[in-house]
Amino acid sequence: MIIIDCPYCGPRDHAEFTYVGDAARTRPAEDASQATWFDYVYLRDNPRGPHLEYWQHSSGCRAMVKVLRDTSSHRVLACGLPADQLEAEQLEAGHLEAGQ
Amino acid sequence: MSAQDRRLPQGGEVDRSTPMRFRFDDRDYQGLAGDTLASALLANDVRLVGRSFKYHRPRGIFSAGPEEPNALVELRTGARIEPNTRATTIELYDGLEAASQHRWPSLRWDVGEVNNLVSDFLPAGFYYKTFMGWPGWMFWEHFIRKAAGMGRGTLDPDPDSYDKMNAHCDVLVIGGGPAGLSAALVAGRSGARVILVEETDGFGGRLRGERETIDDKPARHWVASTLAELDGMGDVTLLRRTTAFGRYDGNVVAALERRADHLAEPPEHISRQRLWTIRARRIVLAAGGIERHIAFADNDRPGVMLAGAARTYLNRFAVQVGKIATVFANNDDGYRTALDLAAGGVEINAIVDPREHGGTWRQKAETAGIDVFAGAVVSRAHGRLGLVGVDVRDASGKNRFLASDLLAVSGGWNPNVHLTCHLGAKPVWDNALATFLPGDTGPDMRVAGSARGLAGLGTCITDGYAQARAALDDLGYSKSALPDVPVTDEPQEEPVQALWQVPGKGMRFVDYQDDVKVSDIALANREGYQSVEHLKRYTTLGMGTDQGKTANVIGLAVLAEERGLPIDKVGTTTFRPPYTPVTFGAFVGRETGLHYQPLRRSAMHDWHVANGATFVNAGHWLRPQYYLRDGESDVKADIDRAITREVTETRGGGGIVDVSTLGKIDLQGPDTAELLNRLYINGWKTLAVGKARYGLMLREDGHVWDDGTTSRLGENHYFMTTTTANAGPVMSHIEYALQVLWPDLDVKAVSVTEHWAAMAIAGPKSREALAAVLDDVDVSNDALPFMGVVECTLAGIPARVFRISFSGELAYEINVAADCGEAAWEHVMRTGAPLGILPYGTEAMGIMRIEKGHVAGPELDGRTTPADLGLGRMVSSKKPFLGAPMLTREGLTDTDRPSLVGLVPVDGKSRPRAGAVLIADPKAVPPVDKLGHVTSSAYLSPNLDHPIALGLLEGGMAREGETVWAAFPLRDEMIEVRVTGPVFLDPDGERMHG
Amino acid sequence: MAETRTLPPRRSALVSALKPGTFGTLGSDGPGSDGPGVTLSERHPMSVVQVEGRIGQEAALGDALETAIGIHPADGFNRVSGDEDGPRILWVGPCRWYVAEPESRDLYGALRPAMGKFGGATVDLSSGRTVFRLSGHDARRVLAKGCSLDTHSSTFGPGACGQTGLFHVSVLIACVDEAPTYEIYAARGYALSLWESLVDASMEYGLRVD
């Protein structure tokens, strides 16, 4: 069980959430090159370690929650809203090392 | 009925006033309340309780707890039979029935024992080497399983119920022994929310089987007073008979509570077992230790028992497991056993101790008149069906025989590190303690007492206090005074001296349950299986239901000796959930039968039930598939007749179908049209208020995802419908768009699927019917044209009416609040009766949409583009939309892509099956080039009087008039079909627009 | 003034299942008791209207609600204001609330103009939600069987609400009083399934259906 700290509802079981996708990618401009779009649609980094992803609190408040999760330990390192800059903050605070 | 002649007249936790009858292998016995099956059998001097898995060696009870490798029995009978149950953990109840396993025809005379005589031919890896070749393991497995036996299960349904519980706490304490009780006490006094789980039926842990004192009183007084205090705390939950069997991500612990396993049958409405999911902020693991044995020749004879277990049977159950005992121990705890047994009236031959020097404990033993053979070992046990004596080899190598019916063995204690391993922490070898200690469990789990290698009662209690305090500090609970450290009576202990095996001839067992011997490990090493992980798989060491609780460390140590390396250079041991076996029923819980999954019913469900509907599952929804009339039954001819009737009468007059399951999304806000423009491939800025439009959505990869109509109800108010299957995903997609992609758009999206009941009236008489059912509404073609929307009332019920059509007929969809759905439906049926309006189900709906070439789920299969479906002209080139950039890539614009066609059988009667592959030549030898496939198929178009189908075919409409073959090799079907346009009926849409 | 709609008769989703009476093992709520551990009923008909503004419009929306129905949303997320007999406002998402009350007027009609003043959305969900009332000594245990929400009184006392799954059905649960009593809002289509699960889960504690 992964426990995700919804910014609105607090810590909840991951069973209340639906995995939405990789939060590290940004949707390209409509007129971006086909190669850029191909990367966006198909290519994922699949890192071992911290990974930014969206989980929707689908059985809860419906918020898209940005989650920084360590893929090697399943440890949730940080949670926030889509506009939040989780990774930079966490790296600065040194939480990533503690989480590994 | 045999007497309990091994039972002492007094002492123990058993209740002599409550005898319990039980039956083991067709013999009746009597035990006492408070017994386990093991203690009751031992009280009746039953020593032989099973046969070993591979060699069918006679085996006896070896332990007094969940680590038991030998005494596995079939418990109960009939539908409640449960194989491989540990006799040491089964609480005795009146009428209990159990049987031994792995023997035929009887426990004393077992033909399988011949394996014992030919054991040289059954070495480690024997099964792999012998049976993996021709004709293969799958062939041999059947016979091997039969010979080996794993106990019998049942194919009958389980008559009992199971349940689940969710729990949250600040501190979860696992283990109700001295360290666990003291940890719970400190945590409880701080005001924290505490859950304490204890595997057995009572608290106290090993104190239940000891004669120790705390504060000069028997230790049970301390247990009772601690428990009383905990019981009185509002936020402390005490769970007895509950095994924490797994620790998972998020510091979640799964625990199995056996609510009724100690009873013949669960009381009414009470689940037999409950699966607890406990979300703990901090865990204190106080799981104690597990004693280990020593591998010497024939160390599996019934009567060879762990020393602590012999002590437990005496002290807790008042059972003398032997009359004349020898104790073989490399540590001081064995002396405690010897002294307790002596005090309990057992004659002690000697303590055999490989250590030359002793300390306080040895002096105590000698003072009590017990011989100590220092520097000596037990080299062999004698007695096939029960121990008669042991060979003792002294320091000079001389052997002597000691007649004994009990050999109490202690090779030291392993901290019970099982749950520390589940999240990946590896146990760490400690040379001084000659054992593995818990690895780094992180701050969320702290280990207390003997589970982390501490010895001594006072030390463990103090450690419980300290670990709980540290956990509370993490959580910010204010410091409070720790309880006083109780006074215990504990002589100083001398260090253990590692001893894993004693050289000698005969089978020297390391893992009893899997029949793994020292020689098997040596062989594995010689054959190159030197990694612990390889060793385990090659020899099956630790692979039994006990997960090698008594065996793994010895196995590793023997491997280290074989390789001439220190233990920590050879590897470590690990454990995976579950700690002890968990029945599938507990994982299923209540989710069986009626509660297998939640069902979703439309507002008109009860009407459908009352009017002959047969239902089909669409996700969780139950939808009417067709309606049978009086005199019809659920047989093919009647079903076909019903479906044909529903199509024919709808096209000929009028029909009504429940479409409540379609997804419905209410969209409000000034940017809604812009959002729709970005979601759909077609344009939305020109849609007028009071009008509906068909829309198609793509995924970002350019493939079609979903379709439906969206209506404009007001200036900034829209109402979207989706397919039934995609109602949830489309809603989430819109939320993703609004929260992540375009948070600047002002649109509020709400799923209203459940609020609106929806029904479609279709057929040439539908306008007439609609005029009759609505309250004073002009429904003429001018007032309510195709794709028009009107808000009105129906028998006083507010309604929204949409003139849209899936059937290709003149049709209207009526939405009313769901609580009024059945009333509205009945009103339509009543008012429409003179016009012949009848209900139709999903089968008729499917046939009618195939007749019209309308695409649905089978065509929107995630691999098709708008052009593939003949909808290419909908794609707007004037605006960006989701999926547009990828839609223009080469592979998606290839004109050779399979596209939508109609298919009719050339013979006019064969039905091409959905999923059939379209090929050019029926006689071609595979592999055959595939031209496409059949997507949807109707067994009969009542309007055309032959089967029809839709398909995706290379070349598409360019092949119109050609014939291809629909091949379905699984059913050996090959049907010649002619390619037609996908619209079989009314291609100009005159009916719909009329 | 809002136009007043006439309220047509409404049919509960539980018509076929709801049978008043006592069921299961009575007397489980302590020695000397012969009562049920839980009582279960449906609140019907209820008006349930969702109101929503843009994030940042919370104050304006709250003021508009106060003007329209006399109560203001509670501060913070996952909180309820109002009471069981009159209107109450339950937080369901960022700048999003349910306004609910036993049906007595056209609540949707009353709220729509108030929300419209600042561009807020008003959506009638009255028929889309079935509202259960679960109360009693063992109510928390019944919830714990199918729900992972922490309903302990220290975190989920009166005034708290939360959305979660209950027996695999998405629900909004609000704590009404310390009995404890809970109001459970579930999608109408799942109401019968959820009812069956709640009844089954309550049997061991003894159940009274009102």
Image: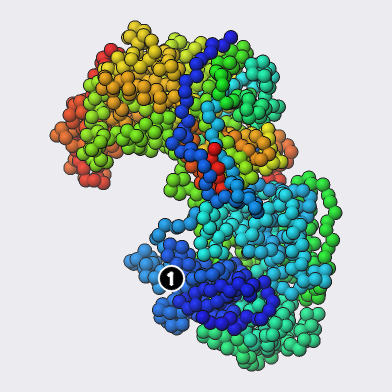
Relative depth, front residue between C90 and B438 = C90
Quadrant where the C terminus of chain B lies? Answer: top left
Q: Is residue B177 above or below residue B399?
A: above
Residue at 26 percent across and 44 percent down: it is B927
Image location of residue B202, percent across then percent down: 66, 64
Return the x and y of residue B806 as percentages of the image width and height.
33, 23
Q: Residue at x 51, y 85 (%)?
A: B384
**Pointer 1 chain:** B
Residue at 64%, 18% in the rendered image: C69
Visible residue check, residue B884: no
Q: Nearer the viewer, residue B335 or B529?
A: B335
Q: Position of residue B72 (x, y in %)?
A: 52, 71
Residue B102 % position (x, y): 45, 74
- Amino acid type assigned to the residue bearing label 1 in the image: Gly
Label 1, on which residue? B149
**Hey, which residue is sitting farthest left in the picture?**
B907
Q: Name the quadrant containing residue B185.
A: bottom right
Of residues B756 and B49, the one nearer the viewer is B756
Colouring convention used in this rendered image of the protein:
rainbow
Q: Secondary structure at mark 1?
A: loop
Residue B492 in view in this figure: yes
> Residue B148 versus residue B960: which sits nearer the camera?
B148
Relative vertical location of residue B359 with respect to residue B416 in this rendering, above or below = below
